[in-house]
């Protein structure tokens, strides 16, 4: 893990391998962003001009490396674009800072220590820079022999952040806990599915539970059979790696509210008997991203000591075709007692989530939020970077949308149109696991809603788009697992703790 320090040292004298500065646009002119005055001075006030000569434009996502002049201890200066400068005395937008710091950290892969002289005017700015840097300094190398080439930036020193100021210290500690938990989720998502089986995922939850004082209970296939979890069992029955339902709970003695988080944990989604064709199955190890986000968010809540109970439910199964697999046409008796006709075994996420939602509802939490890479339809609707939010309560949906905005996660509210329910009518069972093709993401949401306990506030996040990033890395987003929704869930837990929700 990348180390984070707040430093009062001057940019010129600090011992580091690289100095990160911000480059912004002010009208047509390029300007060095506040925080890097000492660096600019070492260039005789010509840093912006030098960067312009090198082709820099100050655009977001841009990174320009140049050798340091005499007078700077660090041998290299890295300028990252910040886009348009805000009005005098105002902070840069948090997401701009986060992404710029992430770009810097990624560009500095292989470097040991970097000092970040970015514009930090308040504790929130320090939090954004820290978060971006720690998220950008991520590489998944567990399965590579020559991992040294991708060694993430080892140490981040934030200049301009006040190490003895309570607000700054708290911001840095929070950023570090949240970023480390996002990176935990990324590791789980990136781990190959031949190794991250449902049992291995459950073991990881048990280990983290031990480390952070969380109560972890694991229902194995025997317990699931005894309990009548027909949805989870029906999805997992085709695999040699049996399913699990994990409950991982953080409690605070002064908590007044309990938030339940439910995650889809399909460790591999082949589609089952309704097999996915080549071209659609290469990244399906990511189908446990919801469970990873839930797991990480519960641990983050514990590390932050939030005054709220957060109960995580991880619905873990592998969706495989075999002689024992569920067939299209089979009817499952769910944990709730409802029967489901499985028309398409590739609509498996809603089956495991349904059982977990019913189980979570039994404890009467104040709210349930489920997170899932649930539908390709949501990706068609919102693209690869935005998750959809559905809920049985408009205010709660709006609150989550606003929280996501605030923490720098792209999301959009989606409806649950009642008319789409009849498409799931089954001649044989209480409901089918598929409905109309049009609005497939909303159909899935309507299915889940049927398994939420009466009177419980519920929201559903479909993160199928942003959970796994296949393109080139950008900002603090690497290739592969992203940790989508963790920041939103942690902030949601904080708001719940504060009695604001
Ligand atoms: N895991 C997939 C959804 C998915 C698609 C996640 C793309 C990430 C990227 C899910 O289990 C699935 O296969 N959904 C089907 C449902 C359909 C059969 C009703 C889909 O969206 O095609
Ligand atoms: Mn599927
Ligand atoms: Zn799936």
Image (cartoon, grey):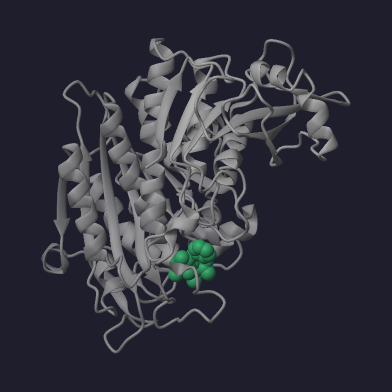
> Where does the image place residue 358, in percent across and percent down from the top left?
27, 52
In this rendering, the answer to whether 489 lies above or below 281 is above
Horizontal side of residue 482 vs 474, given as left or right: left
Q: To which quarter of the image does residue 87 belong?
A: top right
In this rendering, the answer to whether 461 lies above or below 6 is below
Residue found at x 54% / y 56%:
479
> Where does the image place residue 477, in percent across and percent down from the top left?
55, 47
Residue found at x 36% / y 52%:
292
- 455 or 162, which is in the foreground? 162
- 328 or 473, which is in the foreground? 473
- How many numbered discs, if any? 0
- 24 or 199, which is in the foreground? 24
> Where does the image place residue 100, in percent across and percent down from the top left?
62, 35
| Residue 414 shows in the view | no
As drawn, the residue found furthest toward the right would be 28
As drawn, the residue found furthest toward the front would be 70
| Residue 426 shows in the view | yes
In this rendering, the answer to whether 49 lies above or below 284 is above
Horizontal side of residue 405 vs 266, given as left or right: right
């Amino acid at each position: 893990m990348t180390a984070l320090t707040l430093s009062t040292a001057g940019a010129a004298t600090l011992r580091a391998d690289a100095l990160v500065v911000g480059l912004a646009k002010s009208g047509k002119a390029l300007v060095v962003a506040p925080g890097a005055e000492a660096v600019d001075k070492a260039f005789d006030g010509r840093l912006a001009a030098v960067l312009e000569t090198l082709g820099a434009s100050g655009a977001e996502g841009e990174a320009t490396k140049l050798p340091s002049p005499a007078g700077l201890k660090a041998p290299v200066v890295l300028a990252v674009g910040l886009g348009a400068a805000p009005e005098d005395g105002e902070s840069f937008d948090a997401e701009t800072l986060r992404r710029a710091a992430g770009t810097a950290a990624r560009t500095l892969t292989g470097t040991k220590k970097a000092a970040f002289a970015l514009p930090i005017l308040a504790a929130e700015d320090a939090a954004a820079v820290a978060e971006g840097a720690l998220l950008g300094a991520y590489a998944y190398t567990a399965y590579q022999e020559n991992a040294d080439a991708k060694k993430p930036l080892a140490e981040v020193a934030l200049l301009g952040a006040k190490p003895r100021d309570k607000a700054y210290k708290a911001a840095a500690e929070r950023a570090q806990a949240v970023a480390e938990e996002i990176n935990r989720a990324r590791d789980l998502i990136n781990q190959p599915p031949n190794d991250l089986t449902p049992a291995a995922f459950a073991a990881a939850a048990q280990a983290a539970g031990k480390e952070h004082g969380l109560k972890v209970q694991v229902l194995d296939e025997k317990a699931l059979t005894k309990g009548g979890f027909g949805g989870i069992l029906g999805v997992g029955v085709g695999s040699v790696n049996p399913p699990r339902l994990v409950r991982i709970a953080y409690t605070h003695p002064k908590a007044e509210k309990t938030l339940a988080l439910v995650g889809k944990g399909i460790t591999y989604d082949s589609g089952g008997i309704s097999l996915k064709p080549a071209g659609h199955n290469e990244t399906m190890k990511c189908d446990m991203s919801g469970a990873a986000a839930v797991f990480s968010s519960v641990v983050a809540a514990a590390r932050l000591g939030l005054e709220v109970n957060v109960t995580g439910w991880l619905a873990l199964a592998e969706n495989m075709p075999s002689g024992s697999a569920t067939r299209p046409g089979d009817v499952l008796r769910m944990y709730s007692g409802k029967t489901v006709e499985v028309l398409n075994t590739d609509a498996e996420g809603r089956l495991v989530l349904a059982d977990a939602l019913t189980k979570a509802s039994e404890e009467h939490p104040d709210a349930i939020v489920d997170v899932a890479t649930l539908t390709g339809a949501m990706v068609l609707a919102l693209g690869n970077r935005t998750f959809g939010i559905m809920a049985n309560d408009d205010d709660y949906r709006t609150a989550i949308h606003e929280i996501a905005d605030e923490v720098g996660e792209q999301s959009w509210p989606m409806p649950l149109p009642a008319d789409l329910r009849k498409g799931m009518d089954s001649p044989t069972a209480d409901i089918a696991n598929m409905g109309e093709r049009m609005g497939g993401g909303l159909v899935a949401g309507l299915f889940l809603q049927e398994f939420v306990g009466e009177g419980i506030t519920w929201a559903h996040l479909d993160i199928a788009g942003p959970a796994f990033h296949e393109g080139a890395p950008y900002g603090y987003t690497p290739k592969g697992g992203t940790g989508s929704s963790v920041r939103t869930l942690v902030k949601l837990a904080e708001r719940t703790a504060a009695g604001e929700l």
